[in-house]
Image (cartoon, rainbow, N blue to C red):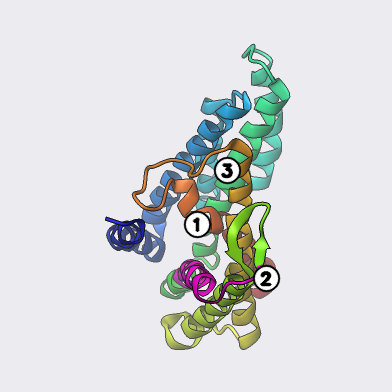
Amino acid sequence: MNNMVTRVLTALVLGPFVLAGIYLGGWFLLILTLLISVVSVWEFFMMSKVKDVSPNFLAGILFSVLYPVLFFTETIPLTPAGLLVLSVFLVSLTELFRNKPNPVLNIGFTVFASAYIGIGIGSLVGIRNLIPGAGLDNSLGWLLLAIVIGIWMCDSFAYFGGKLLGRNKLFKRVSPNKTWEGAVSGFIASVLTLLFFGYFTPMQDLQLGFTELFVLGIIPGLFGQLGDLIESLFKRDTGVKDSSHLIPGHGGMFDRFDSLILVAPIAYAYLKFIVFQG
């Protein structure tokens, strides 16, 4: 069975569970984000071992859980930004007693991985809970689906657009197979996906105008591809092809959700502070 068939079959099996958790929100989405966050951080830490780094697994996993939880509940008097600051000091303090080589790198890897992945994935919960008690729960579910499917459409069209039209390398130093033609194809697909969802699904109840929908299409179309390149940079630096072999045909959890990790917090900030401010 070739890799493309494996990828498609895996997506058909796992995709509905991911989409259902995103649409339903609540505890379903929290459990989904916790799973993605914890496994992705663990994969990142395993990749770091080739750099002679000993990240603090216990602290990193703990923070990767806390970031999504803080987006989920307001009963804890701590924000994700506050946890990020706190993690710097707590990880530094614990490193003092670990007696491991390269303590500065250990601290950096632990704090960065848990924050980059935990805040990125946790922002999905933040988007889903943007307007609590406003009677728009169904519409917010469609909004989150639109963003995630926009990423998937961007990824698919970038791949096939690059295969069919690709001539000019996009970022050869980091990902030699990606092309400008593929990137533009993915970008256009993302924008069109968000416009479609905005006008032809219950997401229209949010009353987002063309400009807001266009920007929401740009975010997956641009930052989704940059998120993929960032993870490629990590993998090239650590000399691995995939973050793990957990998902057949797709590599690891970090490989599968690398774009979403960058897209979600940017979309969350745009929606919270510009579109839905006040």
- The C terminus, quarter of image: bottom right
Q: Which residue is mark 3?
A: 235
Density class for disc 1 (Cα within 10 Å; few <14, some 14-19, many ≥20) is many
Callout 2 secondary element: loop
Q: What residue is drawn where x is 62% and y is 25%?
A: 53
The CA distance from mark 1 to mark 3 is: 27 Å
Majority SS type along the magenta span: helix
The range drawn in magenta is 145-168
Q: Distance of mark 2 from mark 3, alpha carbons? A: 38 Å
Q: Tell which of 122 and 185 is nearer to you.
A: 185
Residue for badge 2: 277
Residue found at x 64% / y 62%: 266
Q: What amino acid does circle 1 point to?
A: Val
Which numbered disc, 2 or 1, marks the residue that appears first in the sequence?
A: 1
Q: Secondary structure at mark 1?
A: helix
160 is within the stretch colored magenta = yes
Determine which of the numbered discs, if any, sits on residue 79 in the image: none
* Marks 1 and 3 in Cβ contact (< 8 Å): no
Q: Position of residue 194 (x, y in %)?
A: 52, 79
Neighbourhood count class around disc 3 (C-alpha, 10 Å): few under 14, some 14–19, many 20 upward: some
Amino acid carrying mark 3 in the image: Lys
Q: Which mark is residue 125?
A: 1
Q: Position of residue 231 (x, y in %)?
A: 59, 49
Answer with the quarter of the image where residue 187 lies. bottom right
Splitting the image into 4 quarters, where does residue 111 fall? top right
User: In the image, residue 4 lies at what x, y percent?
Assistant: 35, 61
